[in-house]
């Protein structure tokens, strides 16, 4: 870095000026990009708190003059779509899916990563093979199975078929492969079996990764659309995404209600997201896809 | 409570009668534990993944309209029907065009954002959050914002307001296939939703590039900017780029949510493969046979594409370089 002494002063000043220029350009570019990324959020807030007259007015109104918080109660009083019910359904589905996937897939991932069983690699390849078949493509046969079990319009039908995620199992396996072996071995020497070592040592020392996977799973569960659309034939079993979608095909369009519904559907997730972002970023970085 | 039972098993192994036995005892213990850990997952995987796939392949050879236990074997008729169905072949064209737009743009935008954020010293976490935030939104919510406000075809849509300032007439963004403005809508929606996620992957990869490489390049006279990017950064990101492109391609293949909500399944254009399957199997005709045949065709296609891309881009080579 240090070049010949006599020139150093002049050069560093020039470099510094170039750096300052580059920095300004950098922050300008990143700010412009940020504005574009934030526009949709601005539209939600603006429309959710406006009247329809303000939204559809002649000139673009940057922000409503009076914030219409009453739109919230109007949304929940609206009888055409039972939005409160759909929120509850989504909450139940997302929570059950998160708990179930974390429990089932983490156990399997640990077994595949750490228990030396002679056919383990064959089992692992069978799991890997399922990654080649995207779950979304198999929704037709899955629906056939679930409907013959009589699970249409039920939480069982919404949750259980999605619990056996080969991808999540794969991610847990990759994570456990990198878990320090010494910790578990010490636990097993102390007389804890695989099961005891797993719950007493491995899980408590992996909470960051579990938090990351929980956040991702919860977001996916809350946001999934195709499967709930297929299973939720009756409006009482609609999730929030199916309810939102139904607003777009309704005969009457109430812009302020539609956007208030969107805002309400996104808000819990944004809070979860902002609160758990650190773990989420770590988790994504850790999940084996590295440069 | 289960802890105590396994602890009992673990203890029984060393307590065997002869000293030569423990190895076998330990092996049985391992086998039991392996199935204890993986059993629940594998049973579910068989029932909810393998059985539907096999059932689907079986259905695809039968005349299965309004029934899932058909008896009329029709051979390859369902496959012939799907492959000669212009909706289905059209959906493959839609996917190809969509992938040709979305994969390179998302890759470039995610990488660009990562490079920018990586260089920030001040407010780095803030900007990273801004770009990452849309990941929390659903495709349905985003499609709603795009359709009802941003790209609403009437005069009070934001895009039409902006083009109106330049004296351009209102554009029917998603209700009219000619000119095909709907591509702009479906591509930007997905770009907004998923770029932040891939940016995080690239950021993690950028942080893993050893600083000595840049120092060595500087000593060798490489100029900052394009030269170091082209000869250091990009090659170092090869494995991540390969993974990102594959993930983007698979995601594009399964596009449904935003197309369904922006364009609706009633249209004759802009239909993705999954939308056609949805209409075939769960629409008025309830043709599970043809729907299953379509699912089999799509699955085979995605396997071929995945293997082909893995070969071309070289997953193995990419991992060696890390």
Image (spheres, coloured by chain):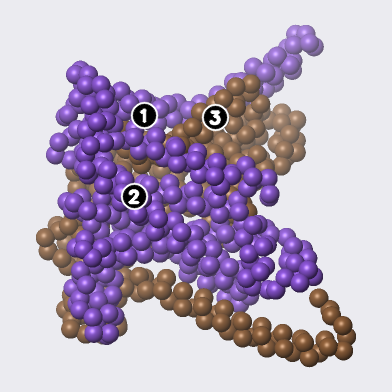
Mark in the foreground, 3 or 2: 2
Quadrant of the rendered image containing residue B115: bottom right
Tag on residue B53?
1
Image point 49% across, 48% down: which residue? Answer: B246
Does A282 appear above or below A176?
below
Circles 2 and 1 on the same subunit: yes
| Whole-number angstrom distance, CA of label 3 to CA of label 2 | 29 Å
Depth check, front residue: A129 or B26: A129
Q: Mark 3 sits on what residue?
A: A125
**For this view, does B88 lie left or right of residue B306?**
left
Q: Colour of chain A?
A: brown
Instruction: Find residue B189 and report its horizontal and vertical position in percent.
Output: 35, 62
Label 2 neighbourhood size at 10 Å, few (<14), some (14-19), many (20+)?
Answer: many
Q: In which quarter of the image is the N terminus of chain A?
A: bottom right
Tag on residue A87?
none
Label 3 neighbourhood size at 10 Å, few (<14), some (14-19), many (20+)?
Answer: few
Image point 41% across, 74% down: which residue? Answer: A36
Tag on residue B95?
2
Depth check, front residue: B253 or A241: B253
| Whole-number angstrom distance, CA of label 2 to CA of label 1 | 23 Å
Mark in the foreground, 2 or 1: 2
Image point 61% across, 82% down: which residue? Answer: A22
Q: Can residue A100 be seen in this view?
A: no
Instruction: Find residue A149 and report its horizontal and vertical position in percent.
Output: 27, 28
Quadrant of the rendered image containing residue B60: top left
Depth check, front residue: A267 or B251: B251
Q: Colour of chain B?
A: purple
Which of the chains bears the disc numbered 2?
B
């Amino acid at each position: 870095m240090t070049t010949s002494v006599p020139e150093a002063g002049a050069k560093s000043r020039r470099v510094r000026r170039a750096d300052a220029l580059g920095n300004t350009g950098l922050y300008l570019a990143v700010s412009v990009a940020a504005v574009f990324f934030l526009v949709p959020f601005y539209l939600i807030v603006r429309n959710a708190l406006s009247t329809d007259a303000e939204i559809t007015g002649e000139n673009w109104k940057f922000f409503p003059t009076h914030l219409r918080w009453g739109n919230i109660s109007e949304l929940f009083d609206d009888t055409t779509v039972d939005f409160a019910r759909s929120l509850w359904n989504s909450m139940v589905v997302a929570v059950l899916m998160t708990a179930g996937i974390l429990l089932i897939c983490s156990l399997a991932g640990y077994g595949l990563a750490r228990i030396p069983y002679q056919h383990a690699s064959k089992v692992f390849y069978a799991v890997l093979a399922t990654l080649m078949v995207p779950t979304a493509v198999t929704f037709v046969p899955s629906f056939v199975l679930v409907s013959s079990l009589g699970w249409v319009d039920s939480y069982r039908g919404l949750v259980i078929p999605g619990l056996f995620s080969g991808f999540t199992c794969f991610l847990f396996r990759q994570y456990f492969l990198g878990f320090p072996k010494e910790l578990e071995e010490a636990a097993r020497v102390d007389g804890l079996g695989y099961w005891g070592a797993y719950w007493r040592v491995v899980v408590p020392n992996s909470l960051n990764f579990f938090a990351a996977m929980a956040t991702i799973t919860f977001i996916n569960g809350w946001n999934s659309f195709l499967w709930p659309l297929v299973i939720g034939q009756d409006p009482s079993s609609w999730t929030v995404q199916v309810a939102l979608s139904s607003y777009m095909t309704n005969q009457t369009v109430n812009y302020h209600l539609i956007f208030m519904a969107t805002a309400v559907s996104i808000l819990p997730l944004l809070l979860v997201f902002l609160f758990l972002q650190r773990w989420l970023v770590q988790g994504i970085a850790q999940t084996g896809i590295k440069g | 409570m289960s802890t105590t039972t396994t602890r009992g098993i673990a203890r029984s192994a060393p307590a065997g009668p002869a000293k030569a036995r423990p190895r076998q005892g330990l092996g049985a213990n391992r086998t039991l534990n392996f199935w204890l850990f993986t059993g629940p997952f594998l049973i579910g995987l068989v029932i909810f993944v393998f059985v539907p796939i096999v059932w689907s392949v079986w259905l695809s050879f039968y005349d299965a309209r309004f029934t899932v236990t058909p008896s009329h074997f029709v051979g390859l008729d369902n496959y012939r029907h799907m492959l000669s169905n212009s909706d289905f072949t059209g959906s493959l064209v839609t996917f190809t065009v969509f992938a040709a737009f979305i994969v390179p743009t998302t890759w470039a935008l995610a990488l660009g954002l990562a490079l920018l954020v990586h260089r920030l010293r001040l407010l780095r976490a803030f900007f990273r959050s801004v770009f990452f935030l849309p990941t929390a939104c659903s495709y349905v919510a985003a499609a709603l914002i795009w359709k009802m406000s941003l790209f609403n075809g009437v005069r009070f849509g934001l895009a039409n307001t902006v083009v109106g300032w330049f004296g351009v007439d209102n554009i029917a963004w998603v209700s009219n296939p000619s000119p095909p403005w709907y591509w702009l809508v479906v591509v930007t929606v997905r770009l907004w939703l998923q770029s932040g996620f891939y940016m995080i992957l690239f950021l993690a990869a950028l942080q893993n590039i050893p600083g000595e490489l840049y120092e060595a390049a500087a000593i060798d006279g490489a100029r900052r900017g394009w030269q170091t990017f082209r000869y250091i950064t990009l090659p170092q990101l090869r494995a991540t780029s390969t993974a990102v492109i594959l993930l983007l391609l698979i995601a594009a293949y399964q596009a449904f949510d935003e197309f369904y909500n922006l364009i609706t399944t009633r249209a004759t254009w802009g239909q993705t493969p999954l939308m056609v399957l949805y209409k075939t199997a769960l629409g008025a005709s309830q043709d599970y046979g043809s729907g299953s045949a379509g699912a089999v065709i799509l699955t085979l296609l995605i396997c071929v594409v995945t293997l082909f891309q893995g070969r071309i881009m070289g997953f193995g080579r990419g991992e060696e370089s890390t």
